[in-house]
Image (cartoon, grey):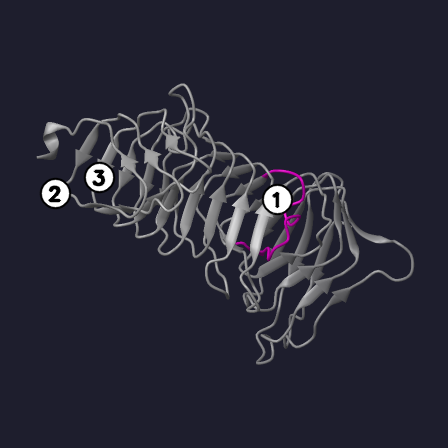
Amino acid sequence: MGILNIGDTTTGFFTTTIQTGTGTNSLIFDNSGAGAQLNRNTGTGTTATAKTDTISAGVTLNDNLTITNNYGDRSNPLQISGKITGTGKITIAGGGNTYLSNTANDYSGGLTLNAGGSIQTGSNGAVFGTGTLTINGGNIDTSFTSAASQALTTSNANVWNAAWTQNAIVASPTWTNNGTVLLGANISLSLGQHLNLTNVVSDAGANRNLTWGSTGTALTLGGANTFGGGLTLSSTGTVRINNSGSGGTSSALGTGTFTISGAGTIDNTSAGLVTISTNNVLALNANFTYTGGSQSLNLGTGNITLGATRTITVSGNTLTLGGAIGASAF
C-alpha cells in the first residue's frame, strides 16, 4: 500500500491493532517509488492519553516510508512490533513517539529522524535496521520502562546534521554507538544519557565542532577521530578520552582545539595510557577534574591558554600537560 492512516480521530478512545492472521503475510509499503506514508492521528477526548496503536504484522519496505505520528503522549507510542524488512528507508516525523521494537529488524535503507520527530529504542539494537542513521533533530528515547536502566548498543553508520534531545524514565541510560559518525554540522549535545562513541568521528574536512553540554553523564570517545572543529566540554559532565590516535592526524579529541568551559571532568577509561598524538591546543576557560581512576592521560604538547587563574584537580594516576602556556593567559 502507498498510504495508511490509523488512529481514532474522534474521541481518541479506540486503539488500532494490525496483526498477521494465519500464515506469514506482511504489511507491504509500496507507492511506486513516490514514497509511502504511515500517518497516526488521534482525537482530543479525555481518554485519548490511554491508548497505544500497534502493528504486530511483519512490515516489508518496497519503498521509502515516512511515519508521521501526531499523537504526542510519550507513554503510549505507535508500536511496530513486527519484523521490518526490505530496502526502503524510514523517516520519523511528528511529535508522538514511535517504537520499532522487533529485535530482528533488518531493513537496509536506514532511518532518518527529523526535527520534531521522536523514536523510542529501549535496548533494541535492531531499531534502526542495517542502514545509516541520519539525525536532523528530534528526540531519541533510549529508555521507557522504570524497571531498570536500559543499555542500547547499535552499529549503524551515523550522519549527524543536528543535535537531538533525549528522554528517559530511569536515570542515565547508556547508548553505545559502534558506528562511524559523520558530523554534518556543529553538534552540541545536552543529554540525560551516557553516550559511548567507539568508532571514528569525522567531518569530511568541514571543521565541525562537537560540544558535550550534559550534566552528570559521560561522553566516551574511543575512536581515532579526525573532526577538525574542536571538542568542547561546556558543562559539569564528563568526557572520557580513550584513544591516542596516530601520526598527528587523529585522536579521541580530533584535530581541533580542546576547550573546557564548564567545571567538568575528563578521564581515560581505556585499557592503557593514552598519549594524544594530535597535540591539540588546550583552552582552559574553567577549572576541571581529572578522575584518573583507570589509567593516566597525556594531552600532548599543544599550546595552553587560560581564561583566568585555573585549578586542575587530579584524583588519581597522572595527567600530563606538555604544552607551553601562552603569554595571553596572564
The residues bearing labels 3 and 1 have C-alpha atoms spaced at a distance of 38 Å
Instruction: Please name the residue that numbered disc 1 is placed on.
Output: 111
**Count of marks overlaid on the render:** 3
* Of pointers 3 and 1, the one earlier in the residue sequence: 1
Q: Nearer the viewer, mark 2 or mark 1?
A: 2
Judge left or right: residue 74 versus residue 30: left
Q: Nearer the viewer, mark 3 or mark 1?
A: 3
Three-letter residue code for mark 3: Leu
Question: The residue tagged with tag 2: helix, strand or loop?
Answer: loop
Instruction: Sort mark 1 into few (<14), some (14-19) or many (20+) by Cα contacts within 10 Å.
Output: many
Three-letter residue code for mark 1: Leu
**Residue 248 locus on image (x, y percent):** 37, 20
Residue 80 in which image quadrant: bottom right
User: Which residue is nearer to you in this view: 319 or 282?
Assistant: 319
Question: The residue tagged with tag 1: helix, strand or loop?
Answer: strand
Residue 301 in which image quadrant: top left
Residue range of the region highlighted in magenta in the rendering: 117-132
Q: At 43% from the left edge and 26% from the top edge, which residue is drawn?
A: 245
Disc number for residue 256: none
**Residue 191 locus on image (x, y percent):** 42, 53
Instruction: Please name the residue that numbered disc 3 is placed on.
Output: 284
Judge left or right: residue 178 versus residue 131: left
Q: At 25% from the left edge and 32% from the top edge, which residue is drawn?
A: 321
Judge left or right: residue 48 versus residue 61: left
The quadrant of the image that shows the C terminus is top left
Instruction: Sort mark 2 into few (<14), some (14-19) or many (20+) by Cα contacts within 10 Å.
Output: few
**Residue 133 locus on image (x, y percent):** 58, 41
What secondary structure is the stretch in magenta mostly built from?
A: loop
The residues bearing labels 2 and 1 have C-alpha atoms spaced at a distance of 47 Å
The reply to whether callout 2 and callout 3 are in contact (CB within 8 Å) is no
